[in-house]
């Protein structure tokens, strides 16, 4: 008579599931919003490199520092290009522009515009705001206010290729005579830590 013996199965080690927590990551992006014609552009903590231009009836915002998110208000106002570095919006739906680039060292270039515009480059050292396109500021056809609320800001007015004779006047922090149609440039809104330049020449 033969007997059959079975080998006992080796006990398998039980594995306890482990939950691994990954670090939280936030994708940085600027935000463009429009409320009743008031356009606001809010940068994040990256170094923004934003240019604003007006061609025909369309504004173009281009920021090589980060992509641009459009709010529902901006989309309703006709803005397009959300999620990319370049956004357009009809000028007819904009009556003022406020740009705040938040922290880090930022560059904002205002090439051409037709609505009152305020720029706050916030806390970079130094931040830079540049006015003009191809050596002329004649495309900036509205009042401009430039501030740097938390750091050091430079203002450069590029009008060196303009063949029209101009007399610039400086009254405290207000520059008149540079922009067309008697529009003015107000620099730093009365706060300190600022420098002004016109082309490559320092403005005292």
Image (cartoon, grey):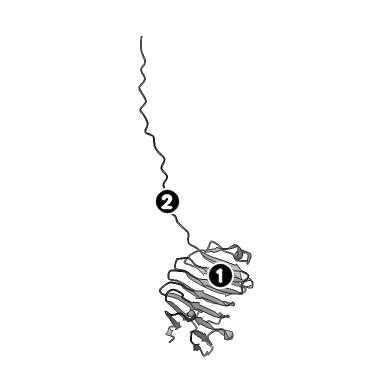
Above or below residue 135? Residue 59 is above
Q: Is residue 20 left or right of residue 176?
A: left
Q: CA distance from mark 2 to mark 1?
A: 34 Å
Using the image, tell me which numbered label, if any, was put on residue 18: none
Q: Label 1 belongs to which residue? A: 40
Residue at point 59% right, 85% down? 181
- Residue furthest to the top in view is 1
In which quadrant is the C terminus drawn?
A: bottom left
In which quadrant is the N terminus drawn?
A: top left
- The location of residue 25, given as percent across then percent down, is 45, 56
Above or below residue 112? Residue 86 is above
Q: Is residue 149 visible?
A: yes
Q: Is residue 135 visible?
A: no
- The location of residue 42, given as percent across then percent down, is 52, 68
The secondary element bearing badge 2 is classed as: loop
Above or below residue 104? Residue 201 is below
Q: Label 2 belongs to which residue? A: 22
- The location of residue 188, given as percent across then percent down, is 48, 79
């Amino acid at each position: 008579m033969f007997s059959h013996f079975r080998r006992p199965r080796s006990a398998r080690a039980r594995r306890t599931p482990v939950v691994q927590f990954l670090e939280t990551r936030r994708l940085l992006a600027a935000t463009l919003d429009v409320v009743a014609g008031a356009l606001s552009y809010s940068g994040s903590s990256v170094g923004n490199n934003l240019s604003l231009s007006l061609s025909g009836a369309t504004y173009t915002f281009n920021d090589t520092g980060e992509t641009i998110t459009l709010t529902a208000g901006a989309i309703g106002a006709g803005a397009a290009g959300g999620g990319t570095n370049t956004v357009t919006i009809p000028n007819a739906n904009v009556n003022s522009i406020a740009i705040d680039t938040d922290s880090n060292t930022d560059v904002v270039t205002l090439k051409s515009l037709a609505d009152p515009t305020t720029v706050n480059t916030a806390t970079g050292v130094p931040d830079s705001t540049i006015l003009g396109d191809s050596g002329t500021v004649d495309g900036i056809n509205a009042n401009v206010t430039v501030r740097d609320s938390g750091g050091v800001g430079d203002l450069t007015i590029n009008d060196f290729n303009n063949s029209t004779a101009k007399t610039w006047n400086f009254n405290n922090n207000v520059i008149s005579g540079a922009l067309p149609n008697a529009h003015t440039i107000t620099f730093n809104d009365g706060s300190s830590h600022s420098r002004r330049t016109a082309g490559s020449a320092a403005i005292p």
